[in-house]
Amino acid sequence: MKMILTYLKHYKLESILAPAFKMLEVLFDLLVPLVVAQIIDVGIASGDRWYILQRALLLVGFALLGMASSFTAQFFAAKASVGAAADLRQAVYDHIQRLSYGELDRLGTGTLITRLTDDINQIQNGLNLALRLLLRSPLIVFGSMVMAFTVNVRCALVFAAAIPVLAVVIFFIMLVTIPLFKKAQARLDEVTGLTRENLTGVRVIRAFCREQDAVREFDEKNRALTRLNEFVGGISALLNPLTYVLVNFATIILIDRAGLEVHLGNMGQGDAVALYNYMAQMIVELIKLASLVISINKALACAGRVDKILKVQPGLAYPERRAAAETAESREAMTGAAAEGEAEKKREAVSGVAGRKDAAENVDPKEKGREPRESIRFEDVTFTYPGAAAPSLSHISFSVEQGQTLGIIGGTGSGKTSLVNLICRFYDVSSGRVLVEGADTRTYPKGDLLEKVGLVPQRAVLFKGSIRENLKWGNEHASDEELWQAIETAQAMDVVKGKKGELDFMVEQNGKNLSGGQKQRLTIARALVRHPEILILDDSASALDLATDAALRKALRRMEGSMTTVIVSQRISSIRSADRILVLENGRMAGWGSHEELLASCAAYQETYDSQYPGERISSLASAKEVMA
């Protein structure tokens, strides 16, 4: 409840005006029975038609004013509820974006979709009804009792006895149904998750002729949800008949008492009609209140579920500034610039005598022998997914220099994707350190590390929009020239040129109007548009033919600058030309070195090579030994 009030604070005026105008409407409704009583006791009793007409016009005025108040209250209630729900939905969405991969894995996509859609819609409906009716119905009930006391105290005691009994019934049903509504929403999560899974994998389901199994599983989940909703709906449905029976029973007693009072001359017939009208108003409002209680119960249950998401703390903490690392980088950059300047001066000094080659030979030996910058380093890294029984990576240590290409190969489940996810810091290591450009990834402020990285994930994901819009995810300020350059490097020129509108060609959701290879090349181009310092290709050429894959790797090597490239692949051909190759087996390092070195010494690499190039290892090994010699 506190969470809902937090998002209503921006709509304080609307939240006050909506019930205020409803209270004004209640006032007009409560005055109607008194006017009717006057018409009966005064106008009809004396035959004064002018008096009857005046009171009739007064009733019409009350009706018009009540209707205007109701419309105004509805406007402010809608504005407050829709606005608060929109703010809440945005807050939940923003909060989800801050969660790490670990929290997203644990929560699951299905439940997050349900809480962003159905749960918040239920909260919005509950807020709307609460602002309009939460005060109106109780005010009508208690107002009717108060007005009844102004008419006749003895008859009003019937109201005083009936209201507490009704309150107990309503409270009991709320107490029972709120937990059941929470269970129903949890079952809805399961149905949503299953629906998403089936729709995403519909081609696989059809390919294996498992449509009946998918339908059967969905029917089971759906029937379970239906049974639970029917059960909780049955309990909630008791509210209407129970309150109706109690109020009608009270009405019978009221008429009996009122008839006696009229017979004794203690009140007029109009007063008896007024008391009955007040009781009738109570019946109508209690029926509304029953529906309101059900809606508010759902809203409170959903608010609790949404609040749980908001209370999930991101598992990754980011510093505000990376002062130490920035200082070290600046110092290194300045040292490099100074050394480069000194070298340039020496080149210029000897250029007229010995030419460029002699100038290079006269460069300061310290500059000439200066070690390249380290781009990526893993120091005894062990990583375990949250809730997993065993680590996915164990004691991984290696380093890659700036501008080098690292190839990562291994069997399914060996930890390749887990490793590159640690470079991007989608997860934190369980032990050890991952360093990027000499700084621990945990010391980078949020977003700074990913600005250096261009990631092409295993599953090519494109969004609905033009090719230009998709590529500009890498760099929103990129010019068309930069886009075409990235497209050419990614071997996607024929893809874009072959589409109507070229860069303006509209891509459907998830790139459904593109083939797998076309999507992969466009996602590689999107990463290249970023001009990353580290490019990670996580098995992102699996849908490319060998010729296109080779052309892509050749184009990447020709790129200007000192970009470090990490290639994850199942193919030897994709990583054999890498400067260093990391072989993973069951989360551990099974080999490290060049293609030739691994071919001579790593059993796991040899096994993979034999499976892809049967009968060729002996000749390749001989060539490798010659190269190493």
Image: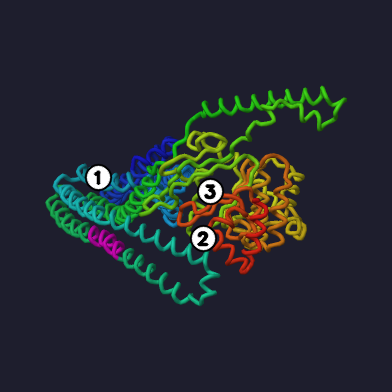
Boundaries of the magenta span: 231-244
Instruction: Name the mark on residue 420.
Output: 3
Residue 133 lies left or right of residue 450; in this view the side is left
The residue identified by callout 2 is 411
Residue type marked 2: Gly
Q: CA distance from mark 3 to mark 2?
A: 15 Å
Q: Main secondary structure of the magenta part?
A: helix
Question: Which mark is first along the chain, 1 or 3?
Answer: 1
Residue 515: x and y, percent?
66, 63
Image: 433 above or below 484 = above
Residue 368: x and y, percent?
69, 30
Residue positioned most to the right? 352
Residue at the image position 37 percent from the left and 42 percent from the top: 311
Q: Would residue 605 be visible to someone looking at this image?
A: yes
**Residues at circles 3 and 1 in contact by the CB criterion of under 8 Å:** no
Image: 238 above or below 457 = below
Residue type marked 3: Val
Q: CA distance from mark 2 to mark 1?
A: 73 Å
Question: Which mark is first along the chain, 2 or 3?
Answer: 2
| Mark 2 secondary-structure assignment | loop
| Mark 1 secondary-structure assignment | helix
